[in-house]
Amino acid sequence: MSVNGTTHSYLIAPNPDGGRLTRSVTGTDQNGAQIDLNVVEERPLTIYLNAQEIVTAMTIGDYPEYLALGFLRNQGMLQNGEDILRVDYDEELETVVVRTSSKTTFEDKLAKKTRTSGCAVGTVFGDMMEGLEGVKLPATPVRTSDLYALAAQINTTPSLYLSAGAIHGTVLCQGNRPLVYMEDVGRHNAVDKIAGWMLSEGVSAEDKILYTTGRLTSEMVIKCAQMGIPVLASRSGFTAWGVEIAQQVGLTLIGRMRGQRFVCLAGEDRLIRDADPSKVAEEPRKSGRKGSET
Amino acid sequence: MSVNGTTHSYLIAPNPDGGRLTRSVTGTDQNGAQIDLNVVEERPLTIYLNAQEIVTAMTIGDYPEYLALGFLRNQGMLQNGEDILRVDYDEELETVVVRTSSKTTFEDKLAKKTRTSGCAVGTVFGDMMEGLEGVKLPATPVRTSDLYALAAQINTTPSLYLSAGAIHGTVLCQGNRPLVYMEDVGRHNAVDKIAGWMLSEGVSAEDKILYTTGRLTSEMVIKCAQMGIPVLASRSGFTAWGVEIAQQVGLTLIGRMRGQRFVCLAGEDRLIRDADPSKVAEEPRKSGRKGSET
């Protein structure tokens, strides 16, 4: 797994010139003139837990091992203490197999639930909510000066978003430093890749901030809480259930963060308001972020 | 199922003042001042096909019957000719049951595949691609003047997007007329609700255009092709696989449609370029659409 650490102080930064992640496609513009457009890739990746096929995800295709680990972790199929023997990625078969030392109870659970419900989608969702009952996020304070500093750095980091568009970004941060910036066609994949990196590297969650370009839906809030990260911030808006879950688990939820502005709809008590918003630079009109991808 | 036809000439238009679809949430802004924000709802809806539980979708909650019908149709679990006896929505239980006159082969298929693959997500995906092999979309021509007229009308239609944000819109159109404008937290739900409406009303697809605020991913292209609609247009960008599938099934794929500009990456032959782009009004800087939701 390659690490691109040249931009800012990232441990992993986007790799927009990586080649394999985008493709040039020829088409026509509004005047009928031929144009070549740089378009992000989207590939199926089938994730196995030992002998059990779990899901086929549509992904841009970087960091398949982290995606598989993070997906299984965020679905509650891998626990933090679980002994992971190997993670095998087969590029040709488009599969990742995560092997654990003993058959996990989660494989039985999945098989059983799948038989009764007919489809794991609803089941997995149910499990995720179940797992949240015991979640108590740490009271780590967050400086608004750090949030502004993070947003400014992230928005100017070279990324697939800025070079090709049609992609989501999620960034794991600590204090005013963005650490790991993952992109993917689905925002849940970008978060899962971060979860996989954290699990793989044994990184603690209680002093981290998760920043995302995507909406603060229930799915995003649940994943962030499952990962034990106490703060979730976004450029985009909220859903009512996302807010409700954040309030329930004590997660600080910040949305619509653009230039000087932001809105906090849960976990206000964690905020240290040490920045004067009127002194924060507004985003340039041509920030490249304003038509954020959907 | 209520029909709101007051805006423009829509058969179904968004209902931003409908009450049940948004909720006022209290929080703080960047200055610590209390603010009340109008936030879209997000509710679980469990879809059954006869006695078989199929999926739990996260939805804004309007038109649950159309969502269930359209989801099952777009997954290939309901054929066009199938006899649908009843669609029962239970608001309290958050369930929709679609009842067909005979047990469908798709229930057996689902049960079988689910047992072998462990999760229907990958299976359903595989089925969708299978279904595409036979798809041949009609050669219906499309005027660029109609595309510009549609975008202008849709972008100024009162919607949950404009009043609360954090939501996707998809619009079924014919010529220069937008017919059915559905919104939902997931863009796949908005498309499925349109598919459900078409199935329910027996509406033909070959002369229609589908307009979406979301990205042109493989999922969106597959759904559009499954529905038999030959043209898919969007404000947002492309993925490479979305383009590839569109080329394969002969779908006209238009993206990045903002003001005068658009890009066509598949099905160019269907376009009649009867509009002079330089005479099309650019979008106002404060269109409300520029920070489109993610």
Image (spheres, coloured by chain):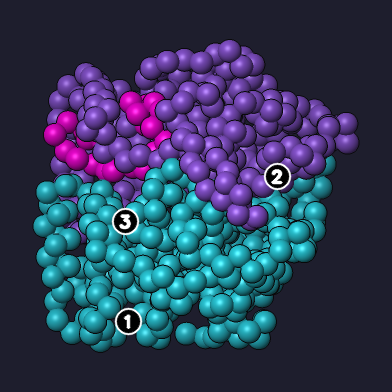
Chain colours: A purple, B cyan
- Residue interval drawn in magenta: A47-67
Left or right? Give the position of B153 relative to A83.
right
Mark 3 residue type: Gly
Q: Which residue is mark 1?
A: B87
As displayed, is residue A128 above or below residue B49?
Answer: above
Which of the pair B77/A175 is nearer the observer? B77
Which percent across, then down, holds residue A270?
Answer: 66, 34
Which percent across, then down, holds residue A94?
Answer: 26, 34
The local secondary structure at tag 2 comes to loop
**Disc number for residue A290:** 2
Which of the pair B179/A251 is nearer the observer? B179
Chain identifier of the residue bearing label 3 in the image: A
Tag nearer the camera, 1 or 3 = 1
State the separation of the CA atoms marked 3 and 2.
Answer: 34 Å
As displayed, is residue B149 above or below residue A3?
Answer: below
**Quadrant in the picture for residue B222:** bottom left
Marks 1 and 3 on same chain? no
The residue depicted at 17 percent of the width and 31 percent of the height is A50
Q: Which residue is mark 3?
A: A122
The answer to whether residue A223 is seen in the rendering is no
